[in-house]
Structure formats: C-alpha cells, structure tokens
Image: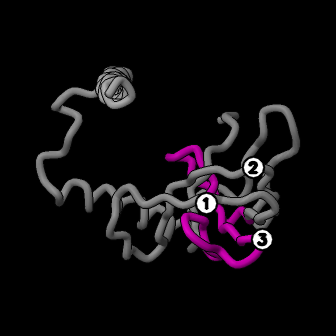
Amino acid sequence: MVTLLLAVVLLAWLQVQGVVEMQRLWASGNRTLDDFPQSEARILADQQEISLDAEAVLLGAGPKQWDHPVGPALELNEVFYVDQWEWVDVVYSHGGRTDPNETCGIEPLGEITVRGFSDERGAALVEYTAPGASVGTSCGSETFVFYPLPSSR
C-alpha cells in the first residue's frame, strides 16, 4: 500500500514538474498572441518565399563567394564535413513543402556542399549528402538547407 501511495505521489510530482517546465519554455520564447499568423495562407506564403529564395540561389542569384571575417572566402561547390548530429530545417527549391516545421538531422561524416549564397538570409544554400543510408529522422542525400554564415558584410 505504501509503495502504491509513493508511486501516486511520484507521478503527481512529475506531472507538476512537466507543467512547470512547459510554462518556463513558453515564457522563455517571449512570444505573444501577435506572433501567430491569422491564416494558414501566411504560413504557406513564408514557406513559398524560402522555396523561391532557394530556387533563385540555385539558378545563380546571389554572390558567388562569401567573404569570411577571419579566413579565406567561402566558395561555390566547396565541401564541408559534418562533425556532429544537428537538426536542420529542410528547404525545397521547387516548393512541395507541406509541413512548415519540417526538420531532419545531419549526421557525422555527411557532406555539405555549398550551392550558393543569400545576402538577405546571411546564409549559404547547401546540399547535404548522407554518409550512408538514412533512416528515421536523418536527412537523406540531396537535402537542401539554408545554413547560417559568419557575418562579414
């Protein structure tokens, strides 16, 4: 009986902790009701804008290199290797995104190839190549992502 009572008390305590944590996370975001779009169309328009930016970069818009503040300039088709798992926001260069929060993970030893730069976003459009077969939440090869660049402009 004592074990059952302790279990109930522990579950109640965990639930309270979960609510407190959710309230803390919500408050830390500093969002207000005005931050939410008032129509689904606004969300889709934001995603379409990202897709159009990606398509424009792939078609040659934007700078051809990015001046690095402390090192050599970053160039088109330059390859980098992922050194740790990281969540990224997927970009579709020809539309097709249905989930505005679509993410996947890039894995260690995956390749990131610079396909172009966006002054407006301060980001490089990169193409990810998985180190092997992707499963679960891992990004597959030929996934495009806008990845932040060091500021020099």
Instruction: Look at the image and give the residue range highlighted in magenta.
Output: 113-142
Report whether residue 30 is seen.
Answer: no
Residue 131, labelled with which disc? 3
Q: Which residue lies most toward the right here? A: 72
Q: Position of residue 68 (x, y in %)?
A: 78, 40
Count residues near mark 2 (Cα–Cα under 10 Å), then give few for <14, some for 14-19, many for 20+: few
Position of residue 130 in the picture relative to residue 78 (left or right): left
Q: Disc 1 designates what residue?
A: 125
Position of residue 3 in the picture relative to residue 129 (left or right): left
How far apart marks 3 and 1 lie (CA) works out to: 19 Å
Q: Quadrant of residue 104?
A: bottom right
Count residues near mark 1 (Cα–Cα under 10 Å), then give few for <14, some for 14-19, many for 20+: many
Q: Tell me if residue 57 comes above or below residue 140 in the rendering.
A: above
Amino acid at pointer 1: Leu
Check contact, mark 2 vs mark 1: CB within 8 A. no
Position of residue 90 in the picture relative to residue 31 (left or right): right
- Which corner quadrant holds the N terminus? top left
Q: Position of residue 99 (x, y in %)?
A: 34, 64
Q: Disc 2 designates what residue?
A: 84
Residue 73, labelled with which disc? none
**Residue under the image location 60 percent in, 49 percent down:** 123
